[in-house]
Image (spheres, helix red, strand yellow):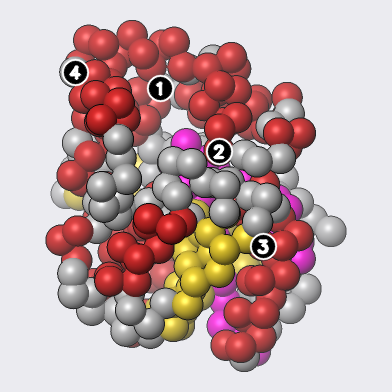
Amino acid sequence: MSNPNPSNDRWFIWQFAENQEARIRYQEYGPADSPFTPILFLHGYGGMLEHWNLNIPAFEKRYRIYAMDLIGFGQSGKPNVRYSLELFAAQIEAFLHLKKLEKIIVVGHSMGAAGSIVHAHLNPSAIRALVLANPSGLYGDSMDGMAKAFFGLVGSPLIGEVLFAAFANPVGVSQSLTPTYYNQKKVDLNLVNQFSRPLQDRGAIFSYLSPSKRPQDFTLDHLKPCNYKGDAWLVWGAEDTALPPHKIIPEFQKLLPQAGAFIIPKAAHCIHHDAHEAFNDRLGKILEQLD
């Protein structure tokens, strides 16, 4: 089965503002003439389309599938712009336009899931379903004082850049990834290198520091009530310590009351990769329901 690999890379130039453009990387898989609604996979903060390499092969025989690096991440361009969920939502819209896709199922993780909710709010008719894997964007009171203090620190320009330098290497990446996995064997050298590489790109500091410098640009609180009333599912890792399901799922069900919720045991924040078999099994059941 074809895992995401460089020979599949495709690119488009996205003009996202009057004098600003970025080169966006994506890949596509599966039969072009599939009768089923195509699927778009969107990675989370710090991620890239390779983070779906244990998921896409399970579905590519049946579905037309797309995966894309969000602006500022993976191998997409990293301009010095104001990053936000709205910017990611606009990127999804540009991609659907590029590929002439009228309807899509979005499978999004964390920040990518949050961006897809904004897109669904702004363009509800373009979305057949949202499958949200440990989405970020709604925190209730779950972010403790220590985390808030840390984000405040990272947000101050000088300390932010010092911290960025400290984290933008394999040791820092390994320390950041480890708590997002229950199955620690998955945080191997290959994964650490995959997540380390984009940090060396020119401009990475702008995208990577933006959620801590302007956290309000990465929240969904302003969407209540959400315009999107279509099918939605929350799939959560039971051991997600950053976004614990018992606290966060109720927050999302206020935003998307129609959303079904599934909690997968022995999985943390990076559920789709951490417990890929259980995640693929659940996604398969959701897709069958949609067919």
Looking at the picture, how far across and down is residue 103, in whole percent? 45, 81
Residue for point 56% across, 21% down: 175
Which residue bears the numbered disc 1? 202
In reply to whether residue 143 is colored magenta, the answer given is: no
- Between 31 and 131, which is closer to the camera in this rendering? 131
- Name above or below for residue 30 compared with residue 89: below
The foreground one among 93 and 125 is: 125
Q: What amino acid is labelled 3 in the image?
A: Phe
The residue identified by callout 4 is 156
In the image, the segment drawn in magenta is 35-58
Report the mark closest to the observer, 4 or 2. 2
Indicate which disc, 4 or 2, sits on the residue closer to the N terminus.
4
**Distance from Cα at disc 1 to Cα at disc 2:** 26 Å
Give the quadrant of residue 156.
top left
Q: Tell me what residue is drawn at x 38 percent, y 82 percent.
A: 258
The mark lying in front, picked from 3 and 1, is: 3
Which mark, by number, is residue 180?
2
